[in-house]
Image: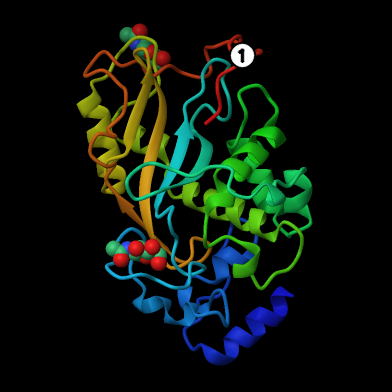
Amino acid sequence: MLTVLFAASLLTTSSLAGPISDAGRSLSGLVDSPALFPRGNGCSASGNLPTSCGNTTAVENLCCFEHPGGLLLQTQFWDTEPANGPADSWTIHGLWPDKCDGTYDSFCDPSRDYKDISQVLSSNDASDTLNFMKEYWLDRDGDHDKFWKHEWSKHGTCMSTIKPTCLSDTEHGADAAAYFDTTVKLFKDLPTHKWLADAGILPTDNQTFTYDALAEALKKGKGVSPRIDCKDQTLKEVVWYFNVKGSAMAGEFIPIDAPEGKKGSCPKDNIKYTPKSTKAKGKNPKKGKKN
Ligand SMILES: *[C@@H]1O[C@H](CO)[C@@H](O)[C@H](O)[C@H]1NC(C)=O
Ligand SMILES: *[C@@H]1O[C@H](CO)[C@@H](O)[C@H](O)[C@H]1NC(C)=O
């Protein structure tokens, strides 16, 4: 089915970039030009579409314009109790479509709560994405598939541009595959650990950091300020904010500063950035509430 779409696209486009996706599914990587996707339903005008949350008049085609969840959050964990994922990388929490005012819808379409995300990804040519997720998108209690299902049903099903009606691919769960592809692709471009390390900020038990030092290092990395969250004094989560021009599957993510009042929960100084390696692995004693 995809082959047909791409072949047809090639006929009408001179500047096709070719498959660039290392996130697995060629669909999200190939169609870097939002004009190509999804075909035949108005996205060809997406070059003139406003950026999400930036429209001044109503936009008709919500396959090409993320609405109402036009404020996209790529959330990342630093999990040390138990240590989760590589010692030198943060891990994925999710991709969340908040409304432009920071509130959000959740669990938007129970009919698309797919049971087995691993299976859905495998049957949608997204095995590379799945393999990446097994390393970088991890549940604290080890139930990764359940965690992925939760993120998809709570947040993914609320994205207007990632709906079956926006896809030419009719395979069961193609929308979920597009959500996970998109999230993984975005995460790969947000190396939080590296940006902190570049500023000399490495996980350690014998030093603490100021909020300003963390914020400055991350701003230097991406050019915008994320939300930085702590639990007590310890660094736990970073949230990168975006608007998107065109479909989230194929359009352009535009990084923005965390909105006013969303700078996070860390204290001003004495922030701990705990190494993963020194903590014993094991069951999380407190089962946390999932967002
Ligand atoms: C932006 O587009 C949405 C979707 O059509 C619409 O509901 C909203 O009112 C628009 N915003 C403005 C300021 O026109
Ligand atoms: C501080 O911790 C780091 C890594 O955790 C270690 O490499 C370094 O030797 C320690 N420095 C001191 C002064 O203990």
Question: Percent x, y for residue 208?
Answer: 29, 14
Residue assigned mark 1 = 284
* Kind of residue sitting beneath label 1: Asn
Between 254 and 288, which is closer to the camera in this rendering?
288
For residue 20, say whether it is visible: no
Picture layout, residue 11 above or below residue 189: below
Q: Residue at x 49, y 77 (%)?
A: 43
Q: Residue at x 61, y 23 (%)?
A: 140
Q: Quadrant of residue 27?
A: bottom right
- Where residue 136 appears, as percent x and y from the top left, is 58, 37
Q: Quadrant of residue 107?
A: top right
Horizontally, residue 50 falls left or right of residue 141, namely: left
> Quadrant where the N terminus lies?
bottom right
Q: Is 234 situated left or right of 134 in this image?
A: left
> Does any portion of residue 240 appear in the rendered image?
yes
- The one nearer the camera, 33 or 110, is 110
Number of dots carrying numbers: 1
Q: Is residue 85 above or below residue 287?
A: below
Task: From the top left corner, tell me how far across and down residue 14 is, in percent.
Answer: 49, 89
Which of the 4 image quarters holds residue 280? top right
**Regarding mark 1 in the picture, which secondary structure is present there?**
loop
- In this rendering, the answer to whether 270 lies above or below 38 is above
Label 1: few (<14), some (14–19) or many (≥20) C-alpha neighbours in 10 Å: some
**Observer-nearest residue: 247 or 192?**
247
Check mark 1 vs ligand 2: CB closer than 8 Å? yes or no: no
Q: How is the image coloured?
A: rainbow
Q: Is residue 20 left or right of residue 239?
A: right
Residue lying at 52% horizontally and 12% vertically, measured from the top left = 278
Q: Position of residue 38 (x, y in %)?
A: 56, 74
Ligand 1, seen in the image, is in the quarter at bottom left
Establish if 165 lies above or below 269. Answer: below
